[in-house]
Image: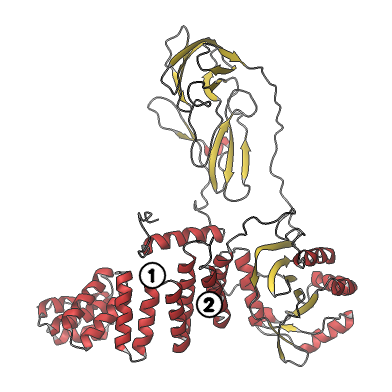
Amino acid sequence: MSHSPLQIAGKPVDPRYRDGWSRITDLIETGGSWSGRERNCCYLNLGGDLPFADVSYASGFDFPDDARAVASVDWDHDGDLDLWVTNRTAPRLRFLRNNGSPGQRGLLVRLQGTSGNRDAIGARLELCESDGDVRPLVRFVTAGSGYLAQSSKWVHFGVGEADGPYRLTIRWPGGVTETVEGLAAGGRYRVVEASGQAVRQDDRDIQLAAGSLAVVPPTGRARIALLERLPLPPIEYLDETGTVGVLSFSGRPTLVNLWATWCLPCVEELHQLKDRLGELDKAGLDVLALSVDGLKDGRSSEVEPIRRFVDKHELPFGTRRATGVSVDRLDVIHDVVLTIRTQLDGKHTLPVPASFLLDASGHLAVIYKGPVTVDKLLSDVELISDANGSATDPCVAYPGRWFLRPHGLGAVAVRVADRMVRRGHLDAALPYALLAADLATRNGNPFDLSHKAAGALIDLGNAWDQEKNLDLAERAFSLARKVDPTDAAALTNLGNIRLRRGDPRSAERSYRQAIVLDPGQLQAHMNLGSICLQQQRVFDAVRHLQAAVRINPRFPQAHNLLGMALLQQGRRSPAREHFKKAVELDPDYQDARTNLEAIGGTGAGGGGR
C-alpha cells in the first residue's frame, strides 16, 4: 500500500496510492481475505531470555477467522484473563474463556483519579511482595490496548500460587506517588487517589456454561435483499413462436422466475404460484416464468417438451424460454450481489429455481435462491410497494427510517460493468459504468469511485477496440476522460484510437497530456517516440524512447525503436546495443534482428562491434 499523500487538493492523486485503495476496497466489497486466510496465533512467554512458544493450536486460539481486535478482561472473575475477539468476517464476535491456568491466581486493581482524569489513564502500578525480594510486576493504565480495542480498566497482575501480602505502589498521572499495603492474592481492589487504602470488592461466583457456535443446517434457500436497488440489464426470452421478447415494466413489481422441467423444487414452486395467483395479482405482482431447459448444454430447449409440461401441470405462465445471454446476465448480477470472487467467468453459480423480485421501476430489490413461499413474496411486495415509507425496508430486520442511505451502489455498478465486459456483454456494461460515473459526482460516495468508473469505461473501450469498433471505443475513452480528468490511461487509449484513425497530431496531444499526469505511461512514451521518429524529430524520439526503456527495460520493441532513433543520430554503438538487447529479449523479433545485421552485428545475438 502506498503512503498517503500529504496534499491532494488541486493535484492528481498518485496512481500507486489510488490503486492501493482500489485493491483494498475491492477486498472489502467482494469478501476477500486481508490475512491470506491465516489462522489466529497465540504465543506463550516462557520468561527470561527464552523465546516465545507458539501455542496457537494447544490453546484453541487458532480459528481461521479474519480477526481484527482482541480485548482482555477477567469476565468470569476467576482471576485470569479471558478474551473477546472481533472479526471482519463471521462470526463477528467470539468469547474465549481462559481455563488454562488451574491453581494460578490473579490480583486485580481498579483506579479512580481525583486530581487528574477519573480513569487514571497514564498511571503506573508496581506490585511486589511486602516481605520478599521477588522482581516486582509493573503495569500501566492505558486508553486503548491494540487495534480497535479497549481492554478492561481492571489492571490484572498474575501472581501464581503465592498468597502475599503485597505492596502496591501507584504513580498517578499527576506525578504523585502513593503506596498501599496488605493486598492478598485472588482479591479485587478499588483504589481512590489520595485515599491511602485499597478497598476489597465482594467476591462473585460466576458460572459460565461452555458453549459453541450454533451451525445452521443448509436448506438450499436464501433471501438476499439489496441495500440499494440495482437496475437490471435487458432480459430477453423466446415466446411460444420463437420470437424474441424483452422484459418490460407496467408500473407493477415483477417476479422473474427461472425454472426447469427436471427440477422438482421448481415444479412445487410453480404450483404454489399457480394456486395463489389471484392473491399475487391483487397485490400488484406480475410473474415472468422462464424455462432454462437445455441451457446447461449451451442451447435453448425445443418448445414442444416445455409446452407439454406446462399443459400437463395447467400452469398459467406460458412457455417462455430464457436465452443464454439473459441467464448469463442474471448470473453476473447474482455473483456481484453475493460478492463471489471467481476467475472462471464462464462458470455459472446461479441455481434453479432462482427468482428476482423487481420493484415498479424495474430495479432489483430481492434475490431468492431456491424456492420462495408465496407468503414471503406477498410480504416483500408490500414492503417494496410502500409509497409512504412506513413499512420496514426489505433489507433490514426492523422498522425505522434511514438517517443516511448507504453509498455502495456505485461500487456495485462498477463490478457489474467489469463482469459484463469480461463475459462479452458490452452493450449491457455501458449503463452500469455510466451509473457509477453519475454517482461519483454526488456527496457521500467514496473518493475513488470516479477512478473506478473511469477504469470500467476504459476496459469497455478496450473491448470495443478489440472488436474493431473504433467509434464506440473512442466514445468510452472520452467518457472515461470526462469522469476522471486525472486518469492518464484514458488519455493514452484515446491517443491510440486517434493514431489509428490517421490523426497523429491529436494523438500526440493526448499522449503528452497523459505523460504530464503519469510519467510512467509506457504506451504513451512509445507511441510519442514513434510519431517523432516518423516526423524526423529525432531528439524528441530518443527522449521518449529512453523513458520507455527506463519504465520497462525488458520491452524489446522499446529497445528496437530506440536503436533506430539513435542510428538516425549517428550513434551506431549505442544503437547496436539496443538492437542486441531487443534480440536477446525476443529471439524471434525479426525487425530487431534485421536492424542488428544491417548495422554490423549478428542476428544470433552474438558479438557485434
In the rendered image, residue 25, in percent from the top left (x then y), is placed at 50, 59
Badge 1, how many Cα within 10 Å: few under 14, some, many 20+?
Answer: many
In the rendered image, residue 590, in percent from the top left (x then y), is placed at 26, 85
Residue 581 visible in the picture: no
Badge 2, how many Cα within 10 Å: few under 14, some, many 20+?
Answer: many
Residue 245 visible in the picture: yes
In the rendered image, residue 552, in percent from the top left (x then y), is placed at 28, 70
For the residues labelled 2 and 1, the Cα–Cα distance comes to 23 Å
Q: Is residue 296 left or right of residue 426?
A: right
Q: Is residue 598 left or right of residue 198?
A: left
Residue 505's place in the image compared with 96, above or below, is below
Give the residue type at disc 2. Answer: Val
Query: Which comes sooner in the sequence, label 2 or label 1?
Result: 2
Residue 49's place in the image compared with 15, above or below, is above
Residue 601's place in the image compared with 32, above or below, is below
Contact flag, marks 2 and 1 (Cβ < 8 Å):
no
Q: Quadrant of the N terminus?
A: bottom left
Q: List the single residue furthest toward the top.
A: 131
Disc number lying in front (2 or 1) = 1
Q: Secondary structure at mark 1?
A: loop
Q: Quadrant of the C terminus?
A: bottom left
Depth order, front residue of 411/61: 411
The disc at residue 421 is 2
Depth order, front residue of 459/218: 459
In the rendered image, residue 45, in percent from the top left (x then y), is placed at 46, 29
Q: Is residue 469 left or right of residue 516?
A: right
Residue ID for mark 1: 486
Give the residue type at disc 1. Answer: Thr
